[in-house]
Amino acid sequence: MLDDLHSGALYLPTDEDIVREQTLCLEKLYDFNATRPSELDKRRRMLQEMFAELGENCYIEPPLHCNFGGKHVHFGRNVYANFGLTLVDDTHIYVGDETMFGPNCVLATAAHPILPQLRAKEFQYNQPIHIGKRCWLGAGVIVLPGLRIGDGSVIGAGSVVTKDIPANVVAAGNPCRVLRPISEHDRQYYWRNNRIDPALLQNL
């Protein structure tokens, strides 16, 4: 039954083998969330054990919520997550280098069939999520199963991503829609009329 997590087929998450594996993962997650703010090295070691892949210099602020304790999560280098990140990692979640998450973001790979009779039997299916490099997801963003967000894109706070988002755009809303491309203007202004110091752009 564990293979069913990644097949995209309907399966029962109450299967004994699945529940046993999930419980072991959640025990580790509980310990991670109980660490003290001064125990950064300990957190790092724990995440390396919990996650499928964890690149260098990743920082995740507890509390972290994961269905499988990060077992199916693949983070690149320098990924930053503010508090309250929820990774519904019943199947794989891929996040590229230097991507940032604001508080209380949700990446949900799990879903349930529309037919009420199947939901009553507790059937579920999972689809992987792919988020590119150097993305920024603002506070409270929700990403639904099976979706992709391209490299460099910004997702506005509170957005619900229901379709794939291309690379290098600003997108926002519920449902999330592309508002504009990231442009030369964004190399001059970081917020409204506030200019970027040109010295900060050297070698970028």
Image (cartoon, rainbow, N blue to C red):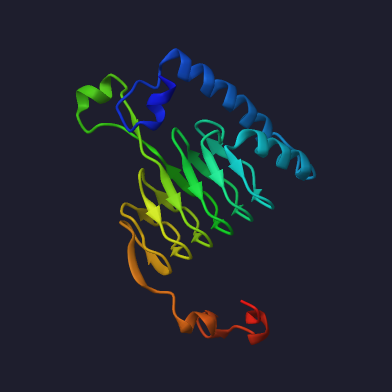
Q: Position of residue 147 (x, y in %)?
A: 36, 49
Q: Is residue 48 above or below residue 81?
A: above
Q: Which residue is drawn at the image coordinates 39% and 53% (left, top)?
A: 148
| Relative image position of residue 155 (x, y in whole percent) | 43, 61
Residue at 51 percent across and 42 percent down: it is 86
Residue 25 at x, y percent in the picture:
58, 26
Quarter of the image that includes the N terminus: top left
- Name the residue at the right extreme: 38
Front one among 167 and 60: 167
Please tell me which residue is depicted at 65% across the width and 78% down the height of the picture: 203
Closest to the observer, 65 or 182: 182
* Residue 72: x %, y % from top left: 51, 36
Instruction: Examine the image and state in which quarter residue 114 appears.
Output: top left
- Using the image, determine if residue 120 lies above or below residue 79: above
Q: Quadrant of residue 124?
A: top left
- Asked whether, in this view, residue 74 is left or right of residue 111, the answer is right
Q: Against 172, is 75 above or below?
A: above
Whether 39 is drawn above or below 22: the answer is: below
Q: Residue at x 41, y 41 (%)?
A: 108
